[in-house]
Image (spheres, rainbow, N blue to C red):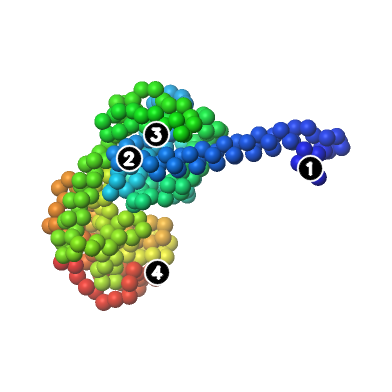
């Protein structure tokens, strides 16, 4: 049967089916084409440049996705959260959960001034994947019907705006940077990233830092593993963390054990997540040096190497490695 040759319950032809199907197909094609254009634009973004895609309404209540090319610290994207939206435009719990399910990191008071959902990729970033995430977020979470319902702002660290006609959507008038939506500290983050690498190299006595797929520096500590991550600001923060137990669901008993850890240690905090237990510690990135980052790695690594085996014996799950304790110093 032809797609347009559809019948209603009374046997008559339903002429509405074809146009509706055509409209849906056209809408999907428009988004597919926009996604390709967006990926190409993101790939050629210069270091210290920014791009904001937003709905074409009042600027203080727009749904938006923002991109920042930080160069060495990585490529960053942010999706607006309720911390940045006025109450009438607030996201529902279901919308927030969908953002988390898509892979966005939830806003956290422990990650510098992160008011919005965020993702970061080491360079070279998978730009088609980034564009796909943005499009799905705009359509499924923020309810944008067509790419032409969007506007863009393109600017650099100094707040200078640029046209990006390849996107095929309207440019937003005015300077987002001047209104607090722009810039940030991409150049500062590059300098901090270089200083962090130098500090880690001095502490570990190597010029070949080992990184994982997320760009985090990876350090083994006995049966545990420690990761070092730069969280761009403002202000930038260095997070040192260790997933000490995986494959264990939260329970009252596990939460009680985590609370006992937090009551008995300083500097480091224990966290019970959906898939296990983590240790974490943050230090100001602007003051990072070999002594400070070394102290943080030792605090987290040594505690992780002791606790992972103890918690595994009590609650099951998996540690990063099967090994005898070995202290970081």
Residue beneath disc 4? 317
Front-most of residues 190 and 110:
190
Q: Nearer the viewer, mark 2 or mark 4?
A: 2
Label 2, secondary structure: give it.
loop
Which comes sooner in the sequence, label 4 or label 1? 1
Q: CA distance from mark 3 to mark 2?
A: 14 Å
Residue at image coords 29%, 68%: 224
User: With respect to residue 69, does 194 lie above or below?
Assistant: below
Residue beneath disc 1? 2
Q: Position of residue 154 (x, y in %)?
A: 37, 32
Q: Position of residue 82 (x, y in %)?
A: 40, 36
Q: CA distance from mark 4 to mark 3?
A: 42 Å
Residue at image coords 35%, 73%: 313
Which comes sooner in the sequence, label 4 or label 3? 3
Q: Nearer the viewer, mark 4 or mark 3?
A: 3
Residue at image coords 38%, 35%: 51
Q: CA distance from mark 1 to mark 3?
A: 42 Å
Is residue 133 visible to us here?
Answer: no
Q: Position of residue 211 (x, y in %)?
A: 30, 60
Label 4, secondary structure: give it.
loop
Residue beneath disc 2? 46
């Amino acid at each position: 049967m032809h797609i347009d040759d559809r019948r209603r319950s009374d046997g008559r032809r339903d002429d509405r089916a074809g146009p509706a199907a055509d409209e849906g197909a056209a809408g999907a094609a428009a988004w597919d084409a926009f996604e390709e254009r967006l990926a190409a634009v993101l790939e050629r973004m210069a270091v210290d440049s920014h791009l904001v895609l937003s709905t074409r309404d009042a600027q203080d209540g727009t749904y938006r996705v923002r991109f920042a090319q930080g160069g060495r610290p990585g490529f960053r994207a942010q999706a607006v959260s309720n911390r940045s939206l006025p109450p009438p435009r607030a996201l529902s719990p279901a919308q927030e959960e969908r953002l988390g399910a898509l892979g966005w990191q939830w806003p956290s008071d422990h990650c510098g001034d992160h008011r919005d959902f965020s993702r970061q990729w080491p360079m070279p970033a998978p730009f088609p994947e980034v564009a796909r995430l943005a499009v799905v977020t705009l359509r499924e979470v923020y309810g944008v019907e067509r790419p032409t319902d969007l506007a863009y702002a393109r600017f650099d660290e100094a707040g200078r705006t640029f046209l990006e006609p390849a996107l095929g959507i309207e440019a937003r008038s005015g300077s987002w940077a001047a209104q607090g939506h722009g810039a940030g500290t991409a150049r500062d983050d590059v300098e901090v990233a270089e200083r962090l690498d130098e500090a880690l190299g001095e502490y570990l006595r190597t010029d070949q830092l080992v990184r994982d797929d997320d760009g985090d520096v990876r350090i083994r500590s006995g049966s545990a593993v420690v990761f070092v991550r730069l969280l761009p600001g403002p202000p930038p923060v260095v997070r040192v963390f260790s997933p000490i137990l995986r494959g264990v669901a939260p329970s009252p008993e596990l939460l009680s054990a985590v609370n006992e850890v937090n009551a008995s240690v300083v500097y480091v905090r224990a966290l019970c997540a959906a898939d296990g237990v983590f240790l974490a510690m943050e230090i100001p990135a602007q003051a990072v040096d070999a002594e400070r980052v070394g102290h943080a790695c030792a605090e987290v690594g040594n505690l992780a190497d002791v606790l992972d085996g103890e918690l595994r014996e009590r609650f099951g799950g998996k540690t990063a490695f099967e090994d005898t304790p070995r202290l970081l110093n």
